[in-house]
Image: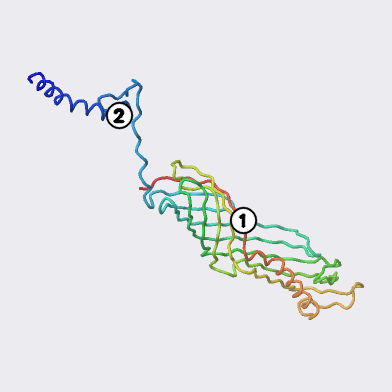
Amino acid sequence: MKSTALFLSLALLTLPAALGAQNIGPDRLAAHPSNPHGASGQSVSPIKNPPPPLKPFSRLAVEVGVSTLGVNLQVATNLDKHINLRATGNVVQYDVNNISTNGFNVDAKLNLATAGASVDFYPFANHGLRFSPGVLFLNQNAASAAFSVAGGTTFTLDNVTYYASTSNPVTGAGDLALHSQNPAFTLTAGWGNVIPRKGGHLSFPVELGVAFIGAPALNIALTSGQVCDANGQNCVDVATDQSVQSNLQAQIAKYKSDLDPLKTYPIASFGVAYSFHVR
């Protein structure tokens, strides 16, 4: 009996240690504080904590680039991991001279100036695909031109040929407005997050889409000069002759039809962006 009692006492004393050994197997021994090198003696890397969530308005990005709206400057900030808010400004001025069309010599000037804002939605937070509804709240895109016809040469209006007077050549002016819908909604898609969710500072975003600017408004006027018959006789003033003005309006209608697709103005842009923490 004494030997049996002694055996039971020893079993009870060793039971807690045995249970502890079962709870710390080879895998657990690898992470146990008393055995930092693991059961195999190899060093075990500590578990890394995930990066803290991106706080709203904690980063700012500045982008410069070029687009079909001109040279652009953009500023963006993060709202959450899927959404950025972006403001955009575009401007360009370009002169082109001595264009020859339908017998007219044209000097033209292009003036593009817009400002807008958009919401950039990233369906996959760590990838660059985005969809961006927005608005151009300022749109001053327009072009203007001055044109002339040298004396003794011909030009056409609505397929009718006119002979410019040698003593009183024809001159005129025109303007094209690309902002009949103002403000104008925009819808674009692109690749590249200007505020990279995986960290980093530089990005190279691209963007494609349209701005719904409305039908272009075109005005052309013949302001001075005379046209004659093929023999230089029977000259009439281009600014007052009903036949000339009627053919001019018909020509303008054809130009407007050609320009109608621009009511959905194409947007294509590429730039370089740099982002940084602000808080």
- Choose top left, top right, bottom left or bottom right for residue 171: bottom right
Residue 166 position within the rendered picture, expressed as x and y whole percent measured from the top left? 85, 69
Badge 1: residue crowd in 10 Å (few <14, some 14–19, many ≥20): some
Quadrant in the rendering for residue 114: bottom right
What amino acid is at disc 1?
Thr
* In the rendered image, the vertical position of residue 4 relative to residue 139, given as above or below: above
* Residue hosting label 2: 28
Residue 184, x across and y down, in percent: 55, 66
**Relative to 174, is 132 on the left or the right?**
left
Query: Tags 1 and 2 in contact by the CB under 8 Å rule?
Result: no
In the rendered structure, which disc, 1 or 2, sits on the residue that comes first in sequence?
Answer: 2
Mark 2 neighbour density, 10 Å: few (under 14) some (14–19) many (20 or more): some
Residue shown at the point (69%, 61%) measured from the top left: 108
Residue 83 located left or right of residue 67: left
Q: Comparing marks 1 and 2, which lies closer to the viewer?
A: 2
The quadrant in which the N terminus is found is top left
Q: Which residue is mark 1?
A: 68
Q: Residue at x 33, y 28 (%)?
A: 27
**Left or right relative to 160: residue 205:** left
Left/right of residue 245 with respect to residue 13 in the rendered view? right
**What amino acid type is highlighted by mark number 2?**
Arg
- In the displayed orientation, state which residue is furthest to the left: 2
Element type at mark 1: loop
Label 2 residue SS: helix
194 or 242: nearer the viewer: 194
Count how many numbered circles sit on residues in the image.
2
Rendering coords of residue 77 (x, y %): 43, 52
Q: Is residue 244 above or below residue 82?
A: below
User: In front: 125, or 72?
Assistant: 125
Between the residue at mark 1 and the residue at mark 2, the CA separation in whole angstroms equals 62 Å
